[in-house]
Amino acid sequence: MDDEIRIGLDFGTHQTKICIQRIPDEGHGIPEYEFFQFTDQKGKVQYFIPSLVQINKDDTLSYGYVDSKDAKEGLPMPRQEIIEPVDETRIDEDAHALYSKYSAEDSFEEEGLNALVDMLAQKYVIDRRLYKERVEAAKKKYEEEMAVYNREKNTFRYFKQATFAEYPWESKIDSTLLCIWYLAFIIFLLEERYPDGFAINMGVPTDDRSFRGKRELATQVILTAYHLVENVYKKDLRLFLKEKVKDLIAKTEMQPFSEEDKDFNRINIFPEAYASLIGLTSRGKLSEGMSINADIGGGTTDISFFIVRDRVPKIYKYWSIPRGLNYLAELSGFDYSEKDFVKNVHQDIIDKFNRKKLEIIYNLEVQLVDLVRKSGILRSNLFEALKDRIVVYNGGGSTYQEISTPISRFTDVKVANADLWAEEIVRDKKNVEKLFNLLTTAYGLSVSEEDSQVVLCDFDKLLTPTKNENRYGKDEIDKDVC
């Protein structure tokens, strides 16, 4: 009997991870899991592949683990001019030096010295203004040169974030095209491994207001990738990799969104906040009650406010903010993929990031207070129900204590760990457990079934008991309900 294959495709800003759920006996057996293995440039097996596209010297494209020696030469990296600041601490010293040089050796007039000090102070005012002008001019020139450099560069990163989140994009190739080509390459690899077909579950950074639009866009991207793989290049990866970038652009036709095509190709799109959460709740790893989940990735941080019922998360709010490890590294002046995060990230940048999380949860608590007021429940009972509630961290950022912090009343910090897989059949379990925080979302996507199940619960009805749940009165609030 055929196995049912479901692909959990965690298409990340920096790197992509894939978890395969295999259910024997046409979906009636016990699920088995494995993580797709990629081979890097040194021939070493990896459980992730860089989200990277490179234009080669012959105008073909390479994906993932690329050889930088083959990259088409672009413009040299601009360097920002360093303007020496004005040293105002030398006014008195310089005044004395000038006075000693030009005055008579045997005379000293304090008025003359004071006049020199005043003159130099005025000069430094002018120098300071000129310094600021030079700094602004140097900054403007650098930004203009960087814009040209970015447009002309031939190695592309962050195209996923630019397509689905708030990230400025100045490159000569559209970010959505790069997403399509990169995912086409991934589909080629998957079809080679699983020729009998599979379902694809992919996550996107989104909030509750933009999910519908991003779900349609992500579906279009995958449908277009499938169109390239199956209709344009007839499942021949070699032809795809030999194509010149100019011809690839011409042959890439964005496919329209269609629920029928989406279902036919078994494509499901989930909010990344949901995907990272479902893996935790499906095995009963979280208790009932109001909780927060924060998935800190390379490009975004996805936060959800939820209640667990029957091992299924009932999500009442979710947010995606375009601030991840890459954001923290950039503002601290280094590349996250090249330098140690803890040693190089600036404390003020960490504080700014943590304040953003706190702002979101503060606003949530204000809405909860308003909800309690409308429900006639005592505010003190709400605060009691919120006391020491759970905040779960996962994603690459969860490995850093500096940003995996309590948030307001959600003080019971839990970091997702490999205990989640204790009951699962996972291939190479000992190896992948070491990378658990990086693989959580891919696993969560693989256990998710259909995106039609993703229903944002009505926040206004959070405190309204169902017909079978008359558990509290006007002055009560049940911690398990909330």
Image (tube, rainbow, N blue to C red):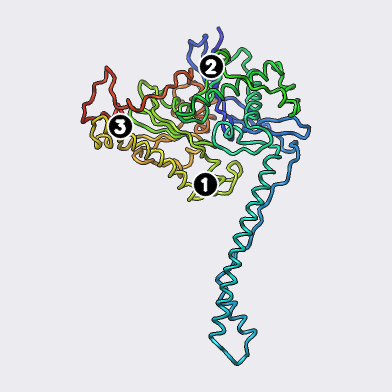
Q: Compared with residue 474, is residue 336 higher up or lower down, i.e. above or below?
A: below
Q: Compared with residue 332, is residue 425 higher up or lower down, i.e. above or below?
A: above
Query: Quadrant location of the N terminus?
Result: top right
Task: Return the residue found at the far top.
Answer: 1
Left or right placement of residue 399 versus residue 173 in this view: left
Secondary structure beneath dot 2 equals strand
Give the label, 3 or 1, closer to the camera.
3
Q: Are marks 3 and 1 in contact (CB under 8 Å)?
A: no
Q: Mark 1 and mark 2: span between their CA atoms?
A: 38 Å
Q: Which residue is mark 2?
A: 22
Few, some or many C-alpha atoms within 10 Å of disc 3 (few <14, some 14-19, many ≥20)?
some
Residue at 52% x, 24% y: name it: 215
Looking at the image, how many numbered discs can be counted on the residues?
3
Q: Earlier in the sequence, mark 2 or mark 3?
A: 2
Q: Compared with residue 199, is residue 438 higher up or lower down, i.e. above or below?
A: below
Q: Which residue is mark 1?
A: 342
Q: Quadrant of residue 248?
A: top right
Secondary structure beneath dot 1 equals helix
Q: Which residue is mark 3?
A: 371
Give the label, 2 or 3, closer to the camera.
3
- Where does the image place residue 134, in percent across and percent down from the top left? 64, 59
Left or right placement of residue 190 versus residue 213 in this view: right
Q: Earlier in the sequence, mark 3 or mark 1?
A: 1
Secondary structure beneath dot 3 equals helix
Q: Nearer the viewer, residue 362 or 210?
A: 210
